[in-house]
Each structure stands twice: as structure tokens, then as C-alpha cells.
Amino acid sequence: MTSYETGEEALDHVRSRRPEIAILDVMLPGIDGVEVCRRIRKMDQLPVILLTARGDDLDIVVGLEAGADDYVVKPVEPRVLDARIRAVLRRVESASSDRITFGDLVVDRGALKVTLAGREVHLTPTELRLLLELVRHPGQVLNRRYLLRAVWDHTHAADSRLVDACVQRIRAKIEAVPAEPEFIHTVRGFGYRFSPP
């Protein structure tokens, strides 16, 4: 594991050596961790975990919307952080090899690639894992608790905002009109259903 003291140094490392995963403290000097995450997302789908002492819902939502795959509030036990790292890396590695087409949307599980109208859709590892989970159960309603376990390895219902924020990011990338989704539908009080047109 290599550590850097500033956001600028971390970005230089990502550009030159591309680590397996980035764990960013939100309160980095210079460019903060959220901004480093945004910049990583513009150039790479590298898994990112944000680490912070601030646990407010707004801070968590900002971090997730910046593209983080997970958000860990300090203080955190090293073994808990290690488990969260392993969970994020498992999501990156796990997918079965088949290609599914839903109109203009093509999900290639083997290549971990999504295309829309022939153009590649750049999803973070967590976004891809969530979409793959939804695609595996077309037409079925998957509740947030199930999705937390399957995608994040979480069991606390309070973390359901992770699911909602990730769905919003996916919709912004695959839906023509995210507010009127064709693929991922909200079933109020229950969860989400992948129902391609």
C-alpha cells in the first residue's frame, strides 16, 4: 500500500501507476478527496472508497455522487475497512460471461462493458455491479436491503441511500430522460425493477 499526503500527489500516482483501488480521505490538503474522486472518474473507472470523519447524509450523498464506490466514516476498525475494500474489489471481479441486449442497451457481463446505441457507457465498478444485479432479474422487484447485500455487502437498512444514489447515477448514463426511466423503475416502498422497453 502506498500513501500520499495531498490530493495532487494521489492523482499523479493514479495517472502514472494505476493502483488496484484508491482510498481517499475527504479532508486531504490541497484538492480534497471528493474532488480527487471526481477527477479520477473523468479518466478511469478505478474503484474508490472515501474515508471521512463526517457522517452527515449530505456529505455521504456528495461523495457518492462524485463517483465513490463506498463511503466509510471514521473512526473505523482496520478489519472493517479491510472488509469494505475486499467487497469493492469483489464487485469489480465478479461477473459471468454473457451478453444481453435490451434494444439499444447491451450489457456484456464477460467483458464488463455496457454500450448504448453502439457507444460505451462508462460506469464505475459499483454502478456496473448494481446494473448487472438488476439485469440478472428482469421484471422482478429487488428491494434495497437485497441490493445492499448483493452489491455492497452491507446489511444495515440505514445504508439504503447508497442504492438510491447509485441508481440515480446509472439512470443519468443510460436513460434518455432520467426522470422518466425506461430501464430502471422505482417501485415505491419496495425497491427497483429492471424492465426494459
Image (spheres, rainbow, N blue to C red):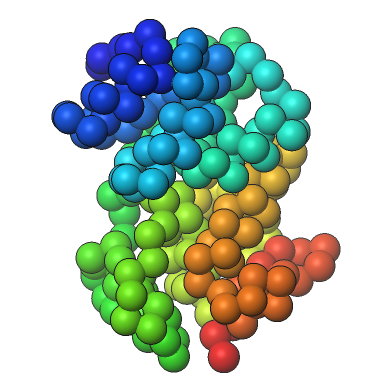
Is residue 49 visible in this depiction of the protein?
Answer: no
Residue 26 picture location, percent across and down: 54, 21
Residue at the extreme right of the image, as rendered: 189
Residue 30 picture location, percent across and down: 47, 14
Which quarter of the rendered picture does the C terminus lie within?
Answer: bottom right
**Image point (40%, 13%), residue name:** 6
Residue 138 picture location, percent across and down: 53, 80
**Image point (26%, 25%), residue name:** 12
Q: Toward the viewer: 58 or 150?
A: 58
Q: In which quarter of the image is residue 107?
A: bottom left
Which quarter of the rendered picture does the N terminus lie within?
Answer: top left
**Image point (81%, 67%), residue name:** 188
Q: Toward the viewer: 187 or 5?
A: 5
Position of 47 with respect to 169 (left or right) is left
The number of numbered discs placed on residues in the rendered structure image is 0
Is residue 78 visible in this depiction of the protein?
Answer: yes
Q: In which quarter of the image is residue 147?
A: bottom right
Position of 16 with respect to 76 (left or right) is left
Residue 83 picture location, percent across and down: 43, 28
